[in-house]
Image (tube, rainbow, N blue to C red):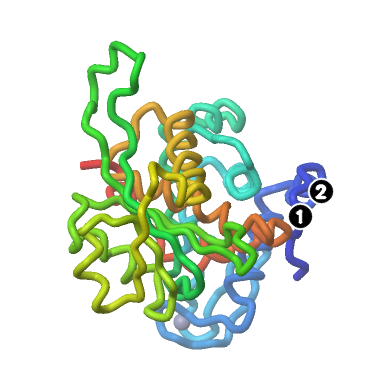
């Protein structure tokens, strides 16, 4: 099976004309190497017309979308593929109401499916940053200056972010995550998840980083009102304004998903040709997720 490459919407629409085309694509990824029966573990199978497989041993039939994040997508795989294409290739903010309007689904349906896509966009945490890294903490949301009447959620959310640079100082990768406060215990979370102990880390002089210095190579420099961390602060500004313009309200429960979406695209800006396929691979590889896990309780 030929993988879909590029960002051309017409080519995309020509390749995926029906739900069947999408099923075929999913089956090609899911059973690329071998079929593995979920019921009995047998490898032999019959390929059916709708691209599902029936186990030769126990006769269990598995659809191409079963046990993936496309599991039981009610509005059709083609729409789901288009939303994935849009979310992986866009450079703009994409809200659930926009997606609902464009693809003819309800806003709730769009929001739930987009959260599934964000789940797939989460970092594997398998490739920690090991070069020159800057780390800083920041706040998101809350009441903005000059805007009145926002009665809901005036509490700002705390977050930490790490940016890795190339040898010539360009932004290479970024990760961001919600934390409860700016203590060492909370700040350390991003180190454990995303930063190698070999990385050269720079922070401002916040004492919250002191206890982390025994495990990681951290140099502290004066922030000089942000002048010494200009690129880092530009990135923080971008993620904050992206969240603010896209989502009028982001819950504590979901904010890490929005960070995941932003960082996923940013970290693949050099490999946009493969980004759609990468996302589909992740959607297939991820376990199915239940609605209850996607909604703030
Ligand atoms: Zn079986």
How far apart, in angstroms, are the residues tagged by discs 2 and 1?
Answer: 9 Å
Q: Which one is earlier in the sequence, the residue at label 2 or at label 1?
A: 1
As drawn, 292 above or below 151: below
The answer to whether residue 276 shows anywhere in this view is no
Q: Residue at x 61, y 69 (%)?
A: 167
Query: Is 285 above or below relative to 139?
Result: below
Q: Do the CB atoms of the residues marked 2 and 1 lie less than 8 Å apart? A: yes
Q: Which mark is residue 11?
A: 2
Q: Residue at x 31, y 40 (%)?
A: 139
How busy is the neighbourhood of tag 1: few (under 14 within 10 Å), some, or many (20 plus)? some
Front-most of residues 64 and 141: 141
Depicted 291 relative to depicted 287: above or below: above
Q: Which residue is drawn at 41% across and 84% down?
A: 40
| Foreground residue among 217 and 151 | 217
Position of residue 213 in the picture relative to residue 245 (left or right): left
Which mark, by number, is residue 6?
1
- Horizontal and vertical percent position of residue 278: 61, 63
Q: Say which element carries label 2.
A: helix
């Amino acid at each position: 099976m030929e993988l879909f490459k590029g960002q051309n919407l017409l080519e995309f629409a020509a390749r995926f004309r029906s739900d069947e085309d999408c099923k075929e694509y999913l089956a090609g990824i899911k059973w690329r190497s071998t079929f593995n029966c979920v019921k009995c573990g047998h490898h032999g199978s019959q390929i059916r017309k709708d691209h599902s497989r029936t186990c030769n041993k126990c006769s269990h039939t598995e659809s191409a979308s079963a046990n993936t994040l496309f599991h039981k997508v009610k509005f059709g795989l083609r729409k789901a593929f288009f939303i994935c294409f849009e979310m992986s290739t866009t450079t703009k903010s994409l809200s659930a109401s926009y997606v609902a309007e464009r693809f003819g689904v309800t806003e709730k349906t769009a929001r739930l499916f987009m959260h599934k896509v964000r789940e797939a966009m989460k970092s594997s945490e398998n490739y920690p940053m090991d070069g020159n890294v800057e780390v800083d903490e920041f706040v998101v949301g809350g009441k903005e200056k000059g805007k009145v009447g926002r009665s809901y959620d005036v509490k700002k959310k705390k977050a930490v972010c790490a940016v890795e640079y190339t040898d010539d100082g360009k932004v290479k990768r970024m990760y961001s995550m919600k934390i409860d406060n700016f203590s060492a215990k909370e700040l350390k979370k991003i180190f454990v998840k995303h930063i190698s102990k070999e990385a050269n880390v720079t922070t401002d002089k916040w004492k919250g980083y002191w206890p982390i210095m025994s495990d990681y190579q951290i140099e502290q420099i004066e922030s000089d009102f942000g002048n010494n961390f200009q690129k880092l602060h530009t990135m923080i500004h971008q993620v904050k304004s992206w969240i603010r313009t896209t989502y009028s309200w982001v819950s504590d429960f979901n904010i890490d998903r929005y960070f995941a979406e932003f960082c996923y695209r940013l970290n693949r800006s050099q490999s946009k040709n493969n980004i759609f396929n990468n996302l589909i691979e992740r959607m297939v590889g991820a376990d199915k997720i239940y609605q209850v896990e996607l909604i703030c309780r």
